[in-house]
Image (cartoon, rainbow, N blue to C red):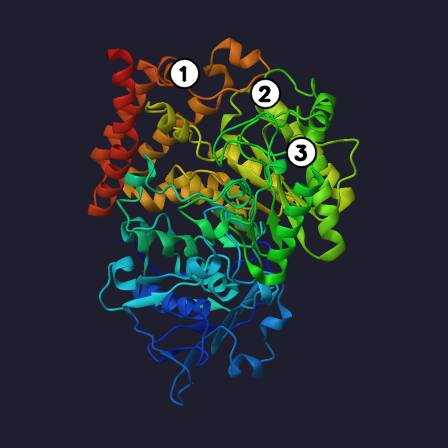
Amino acid sequence: MLKYIITFCFSLCFSILFAHEAYILDKNTQIVISPDPSNSVRLAAVELQYFIGKTTGLQIPIVHLCSNNVDKVIFVGQSSYTDQYGISEECLGEQEYLIDVSPQRIILIGKDTDVTSEIICDKGRSNNGFSPEEDRRQINYQQATGNSDVVSQLTLPSIFDAQGTCYAVYDFIERFLGVRFYGPSPKNIVVPSIQRLRIDNVHIQRAPAIKYRDGSLTFGWPFMKAQFMDATEDMLHLYMRRMRMGGRRWAANHAFTGFQDRFLKQNPARPELFEGSHPEYFAVGRGGGASERQFCYTNPDFIHQVAQDAIRYFEGKGTIAEQVALGEYFAIVPLDNSSWCTCDECQKLLAIDKNNILGQHFNCGTATHYIWNFVNKVAHEIKRVAPDKKLAALAYHVYAYLPKDIKLEDNIAVAPCLHTRNYWAPGMKRNEMMLYKSWIEESKSSGRDIFLWSYLGFPTERGLVTNFNVFPGFNAHATGEQMRMYATDGVKGVYLCGLSEQIDFYLTMKLFDNPSLDTDEILDEFFDRYFGKAAEAMKKFYLKIESVYSDPANYPSYIQTQDAQFHQTRELAWKYLGTPRVMEELEGYIEQARLEAESIEEKERVNSWKIGVWDYMLAGFNDYYKN
């Protein structure tokens, strides 16, 4: 473990005031919180206490009242003491926090009061299927940290709770203690040893750039499962807070699967949902189960029913069945297929966009007028009753393109769905950047909230679905460019559909918080701090995979020239990407790293990549050439 004295003076993107004196942490320091702390403040104080102890060896108590004989104080969250300094969370905006350091005290405080209206605060259902109330889970903190000398049970705030004080403390832990959260397991966390902690006077006031930051919980997928060293569920949920997942309450997903049980016939498994038979709601000439049969999206009664469901939610009565809604947003997204209603009115609208497609792309506009006309009518009805609330809609598949001759209501928040991991296919990139930019430009004139649905799980998800081991989709540099573009364009949030590799996920979350960070600096720091003596070989291993995966020249000519949707296949993975020559080079790097790793930590971390990435790749390579 590296031993060094840390003296930090940071100015990047922050307001900083310098003075000659500094705060020097000593054994007489206390962490002070209010007598009735929120889950956010409690977690923040416990995490600060734990990492001060891990880095400096000092055991700092958490108290509610300052002792007269203490030399130094760290105030965590708002209290009567911070009020005396004239510092209050009332002066802070959404997710904003403050780090204020002077010679005798440190104040770490953030916006911990939810901006969501109280009546719907704990109602709703996220893209992952749970409410904020269900997400305030209790964990075994001793087990999650691998340390028996800490508090045993701890209740986490929901990732969607206001937790600015947590953000302040995690920023402090990373910035001034040098800790790096490279994964959920204690073995993933880099914790330097500090002999003397000295912090110059500093005043930092900021908030994460991207306000909504969430993703599907796929930590058991290939790569991450081994890279995260079989982390427990408690470790994973604590890690989500450490990485600042959550933020603004928003959700948008396919939301009508409960309608058959409500309006077609009574389901014996949940009879309480049945409200009466309304076959007119459903697509004419179509059949199928709850997630298959579409609806008549021009039917006035169906439109009114959807609007009433949204209003019901905004009145604080919650969601019904599998409806998706969170915070001030209620989702209306069609079922995931194109089996549209065959009635005359629906077919009339569908005919408008018969040729609204470029090439053979999944994301196109062949149902643009049909679906956005439906969304617009629901939004119009809601606006009369709840003008301050919003619908959440996806620009997805055959309704991905902006309807240029429909003036959309300004209470519709839109999330284009982007296959950002597949931009090695130039046609896909052109098509999706076109639709993305059209929505962005429209949002600037309408004031519309734009979110994104990003398929970060490719190609891993494709391998799981079609049963082959993929060539990894390492994509750090392209990800960096995308995150900076999103921040510049005013994107409010991103849902990550699939989280598939350790450093790419870490990089993504860091850039959500601060997109001005340099991609190469983040990568260099990761490989140096995480792998130590084996850093250079492991970095070459990563960069080789990234360069092969992301370069269109490594793919067949038809992929480089066609306007069409493409996904990685077994043949693409091992005939064109993981060729014998590439695999031989990668094997050399991983073997070199195994030889150069010195400490137990370095060896374990290299081995986690060998098992999770290299052995997985080798199995896919051997399977392809064997057959």
> Observer-nearest residue: 342 or 74?
342
249 displayed left or right of 146: right
> Observer-nearest residue: 463 or 320?
320
Where on the picture, by quarter, is residue 581? top left
Q: Which residue is mark 3?
A: 371
Percent of width and height locating residue 342: 64, 24
> Observer-nearest residue: 536 or 291?
291
Could you say whether the residue bearing mark 3 is in a helix, strand or loop?
helix
Q: Which residue is mark 2?
A: 361
In the rendered view, tell whether residue 259 sits above or below residue 612. below
Numbered disc in front, either 3 or 2: 3
In the rendered view, tell whether residue 49 sits above or below residue 437. below
How far is mark 3 from mark 1, CA to CA?
35 Å
Percent of width and height locating residue 502: 37, 41
In the rendered view, tell whether residue 461 sits above or below residue 35. above
67 displayed left or right of 19: left
Can you tell which mark lies on residue 118? none
Percent of width and height locating residue 535: 32, 38
- Mark 2: amino acid: His
Q: First in sequence, mark 3 or 2: give its number.
A: 2
> Can residue 549 be spotted in the picture?
yes
Could you say whether the residue bearing mark 1 is in a helix, strand or loop?
helix
Numbered disc in front, either 1 or 2: 2
Q: Residue at x 27, y 42 (%)?
A: 605
Percent of width and height locating residue 57: 28, 68
Q: Which residue is mark 1?
A: 572
> Can residue 194 be spotted in the picture?
no
194 displayed left or right of 163: left
- Mark 1: amino acid: Leu
How far is mark 1 from mark 2, CA to CA?
19 Å
Where on the picture, by quarter, is residue 458? top left
